[in-house]
Image: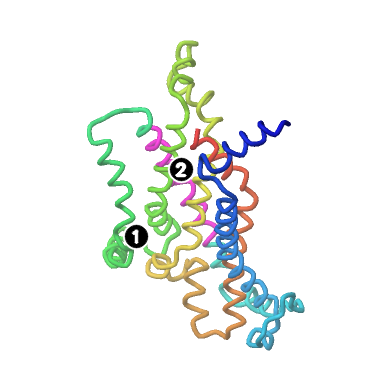
Amino acid sequence: MSQSTQTAKLMVDGPVHGRGPWHRYVFTGIVVLLCLWVLVPIYLLVVNTLSSPADVNAFPKRLVPDVNTESVRFFLNFAGVGQALWSSVKVATLTMILSILAGAPAGYALSRFDFRGKGSFRVLVLMTRAFPLPLLALPLAVMYIRVGLDDSILGLALVHTTLALPFAVLITYSLFSGIPIELEEAAWTLGCNRLEAFQKVILPLVLPGITASAIFAFVISWNEVFAAAVLTIENRTLPAFLLQGLSVAPLHLKFAGGAVLVLPALIFIFLVRKYLFSMWGIANR
């Protein structure tokens, strides 16, 4: 490469567009800070969970603790933990299914049809997150008692679906908007009706994104604690059980409970991470 070519390349990559070396350093620093913001609490949670009760209160902490599973074993064998964990799985799974069954058709309709009040409808969907759940807790509890949904998996899943539905609608709307309508029109000209065109052309393209939307719904339900604590007694989910049972527990048991709560969600997201990346690839087309 000649000297003139190198100079021209430097001008294009550098001062002309304002992309000096400091650009890269700032970007790298922001990424590192964000990673530390997420990973350091998880690391401290794991370290204290795998430490002995005496080491949990010790300072300074060891970078690599002596593995001691006494706290975890005691927590898992504690009465009610298994039932609460199973209730969390059932509620989160049902929430995931309901949010996709209701959110995906709404997202498709918003992306493909023009109707009066379409913009207002999108705002209203988002505004459902503006109402604080504690404000609605008492009316919900009274209504659930009257209709027989109190202390039930279905009743709690319906509340969690309401919390997850705005994300499902907006994410699927973005996904469907990123796919040209000409693909469906081409399928129509080849003899497919709207449903067949959706099943054969659109659904395979948006399936990773719908899966990612389902993951968000699952995590929202898994971590929700207020509605679970108010609306359930016998069928409490794990976060509500932890809130009730670990408030006066020793510190090492609190770390063990936090790890049991966080670990399944992390594993679930890790196993389906490729669908998350695929979702953003579709949405940004």
Q: Which residue is mark 1?
A: 148
Rounded to the nearest angstrom, the CA distance separating label 2 from label 1 is: 25 Å
Q: Residue at x 28, y 46 (%)?
A: 124
Q: Which residues are magenta?
A: 88-108
Q: Amino acid at mark 1?
A: Gly
Type of secondary structure dominating the magenta stretch: helix
Q: Nearer the viewer, mark 2 or mark 1?
A: 2
Q: Residue at x 60, y 51 (%)?
A: 21
Residue closest to the eye, 157 or 250: 250
Where in the figure is residue 184, as x and y percent of width and height? 46, 20
Q: Quadrant of residue 121?
A: top left
Q: Which mark is residue 100?
A: 2
Residue closest to the eye, 68 or 87: 68
Q: Earlier in the sequence, mark 2 or mark 1?
A: 2
Q: Amino acid at mark 2?
A: Ile
Where in the figure is residue 143, as x and y percent of width and height? 28, 61
Where in the figure is residue 126, as x and y percent of width and height? 33, 49
Relative placement, left or right, of 141 versus 153 is left
